[in-house]
Image (cartoon, rainbow, N blue to C red):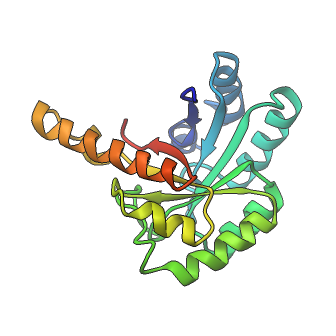
């Protein structure tokens, strides 16, 4: 299966919000990415709206559905009631669940799926019932695939931060080997695989 790129436009929104001006325009930049061949757009709205805002989500949905009907829209976030309500209203192609605290600056670890299995099972059931494919943000651990499948997830997204932060060859290859092992385990379990963050 070919690799597909979904462009995260959170940093575009953060630049816009620094001066509370209408540019750079998140929708226009997303359109450029899709015209250039990206397969989708990813956003991660946070409770403090420091980058992607609620209205951005609906503006992006409108543009993608009208101008790029084959493109994928992915909303990431911690599955709080507000996030679940936003996903239900926006109807993205995929919802990616991350274990972030509300005040966390960025995602820096994946779910302990086994520990949170009851919570995640209920959330996954709700999201899939609303028509979204569900991905769980996980560490590069080949054991996680079995737990992800057990809670009903369609995919995992492997956190690649340790790989992206390493510059020495031997440790970097060790991180890459862990990512590959996690991806292969997920495929064996029938799960799709995303990889992201700090690539």
Q: Residue 4 placed where, x, y %?
A: 58, 30
Q: Residue 59 placed where, x, y %?
A: 79, 42
Residue 172 in view in this figure: yes
Q: In this view, does 30 lie to the left or right of 130?
A: left
Observer-nearest of 28 and 137: 137
Residue 21 in view in this figure: no
Q: Is residue 68 above or below residue 180?
A: above
Determine the residue positioned at 57% across, 52% down. 190
Determine the residue positioned at 51% across, 79% down. 117
Q: Residue 7 placed where, x, y %?
A: 57, 33
- Residue 29 falls in which quadrant of the image? top right
Determine the residue positioned at 51% across, 47% down. 187
Pick out the residue farthest to the right. 66
Q: In this view, does 79 lie to the left or right of 141?
A: right
Number of residue marks: 0
Q: Quadrant of the C terminus?
A: top left
Determine the residue positioned at 60% across, 62% down. 153
Observer-nearest of 168 and 30: 168
Observer-nearest of 36 and 12: 36
Q: Residue 92 placed where, x, y %?
A: 75, 50
Q: In which quarter of the image is the N terminus?
A: top right
Q: In this view, does 136 lie to the left or right of 83?
A: left
């Amino acid at each position: 299966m070919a690799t597909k790129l979904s462009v995260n436009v959170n940093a575009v929104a953060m630049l816009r919000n620094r001066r509370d001006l209408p540019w750079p325009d998140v929708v226009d930049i997303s359109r450029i990415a899709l015209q250039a061949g990206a397969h989708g757009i990813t956003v991660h709205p946070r409770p403090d709206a420091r980058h992607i805002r609620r209205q951005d989500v609906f503006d992006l949905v409108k543009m993608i559905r009208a101008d790029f009907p084959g493109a994928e829209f992915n909303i990431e976030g911690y599955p709080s009631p507000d996030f679940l309500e936003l996903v239900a209203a926006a109807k993205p192609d995929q919802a990616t669940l991350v274990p972030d605290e509300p005040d966390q600056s960025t995602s820096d670890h994946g779910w302990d799926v086994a520990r949170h299995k009851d919570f995640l099972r209920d959330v996954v059931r709700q999201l899939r019932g609303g028509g979204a494919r569900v991905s769980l943000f996980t560490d590069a651990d080949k054991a996680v695939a079995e737990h992800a499948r057990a809670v009903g997830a369609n995919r995992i997204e492997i956190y690649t931060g340790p790989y992206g932060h390493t510059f020495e060859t031997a440790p970097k290859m060790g991180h890459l080997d862990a990512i590959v092992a996690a991806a292969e385990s997920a495929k064996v379990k029938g799960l799709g695989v995303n990889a992201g963050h700090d690539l």
